[in-house]
Image (spheres, helix red, strand yellow):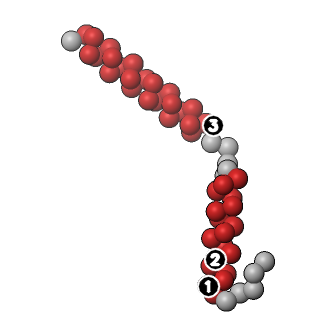
Amino acid sequence: MDSEVLTLGVLAILVAGGWLIDLLGHRGASPLQRRMVQQIKKSADTIRGAPLR
């Protein structure tokens, strides 16, 4: 019984640690995200009939 509880405790700590590292390491939009946003805006402008930038 103690082994299972210890294993689940360690797993919970690892998951929480990974989540915190991911949360703190997120600095901003990646280059891929910026390009995707730019492409979506360009596509929306095209659909509306605006000239391309």
- Disc ID at residue 10: none
Q: Is residue 3 above or below residue 36?
A: above
Is there a contact, CB below 8 Å, between mark 1 and mark 2? yes
Mark 2 surroundings within 10 Å by alpha-carbon count, few (fewer than 14), some (14 through 19), many (20 or more): some
Can you tell which of label 3 and label 1 is closer to the viewer?
Answer: 1
Q: Earlier in the sequence, mark 3 or mark 1?
A: 3
- Residue shown at the point (62%, 70%) measured from the top left: 40
Query: For the residues marked 1 and 2, what is the alpha-carbon distance in whole angstroms?
Result: 6 Å
- Residue shown at the point (78%, 77%) measured from the top left: 53
Q: Is mark 3 on a helix, strand or loop?
A: helix
- Disc ID at residue 25: 3
Residue type at mark 3: give it. Answer: Gly
- Lateral position of residue 43 relative to residue 12, left or right: right
- Lateral position of residue 36 relative to residue 17, left or right: right
Query: For the residues marked 3 and 1, what is the alpha-carbon distance in whole angstroms?
Result: 36 Å
| Residue occupied by mark 1 | 47
- Residue shown at the point (75%, 86%) measured from the top left: 51
Foreground of the two, 35 or 24: 35
In percent of width and height, residue 19 lies at 50, 35
Q: Residue furthest bottom?
A: 49
- Residue shown at the point (43%, 23%) measured from the top left: 13
- Quarter of the image for residue 14 reads top left
Residue type at mark 1: give it. Answer: Ile
In percent of width and height, residue 27 lies at 67, 43
| Residue occupied by mark 2 | 43
Q: Earlier in the sequence, mark 3 or mark 2?
A: 3
The total of numbered circles placed on residues is 3
In percent of width and height, residue 29 lies at 67, 52
